[in-house]
Amino acid sequence: PVYVAAGTELDGPTPSAAVLLSPFDNLLWDRPFARRIFGFDHLIEVYKPAPQRRFGYYVLPLLWGERIAGRADLKAERREGRLLVRAFHREAGVRASAALDDALDRALARLARTIGLEEVRR
C-alpha cells in the first residue's frame, strides 16, 4: 500500500522511465551495495570546497530502467520558479541518446512540479 495525498498529480498509465533519486535514498544509503549492484559510487560533495568537487554541490543520481545512468547537478531558483540544470554527467558506458534525453526531461519535469517550480532550464 502507498499513501498519496489528495490532489497529487499522478503519472499516466505508463510511468516515466527514469527518476531522480535523493542522495539519501535507501537504494544508495549502503554505498558498497550500490557499488556492487549498479557499479555506482556516490559521494556527497556538499562539504567539499568547490574546486575539489567532481560532479557538483548536491547531485541527484538518475535511475533509468535498471541502472544509474548519470548524475544531475541542479539548483532550484525559487524566485524565478525555475529548476536549473547546471550539468548532467553520464555514468561510464552510458551513451548519449534521444531516449536518455527524453527520460531525463521527464524526470526533471516531475521533480520541478514536486517542489513547486514551473520551469526547467537545461
Image (cartoon, rainbow, N blue to C red):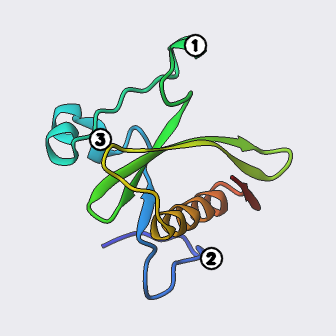
Residue that badge 1 annotates: 51
Coordinates of residue 115 in the picture (x, y in percent): 65, 54
Q: Residue at x 41, y 38 (%)?
A: 23
Give the camera-side residue of 24 and 60: 60
The label shown at residue 28 is: 3
Q: Secondary structure at mark 2?
A: loop
The label shown at residue 32 is: none
The part of the image, by quadrant, that contains residue 40 is: top left
Give the camera-side residue of 99 and 62: 99
Coordinates of residue 97 in the picture (x, y in percent): 47, 64
User: In the displayed structure, would residue 5 be above or below residue 93?
Assistant: below
Discs 2, 1 touching: Cβ within 8 Å: no
Discs 2, 3 touching: Cβ within 8 Å: no
Q: Earlier in the sequence, mark 3 or mark 1?
A: 3
User: In the displayed structure, would residue 110 be above or below residue 79?
Assistant: below
Cα gap from disc 2 to disc 3, whole angstroms:
30 Å
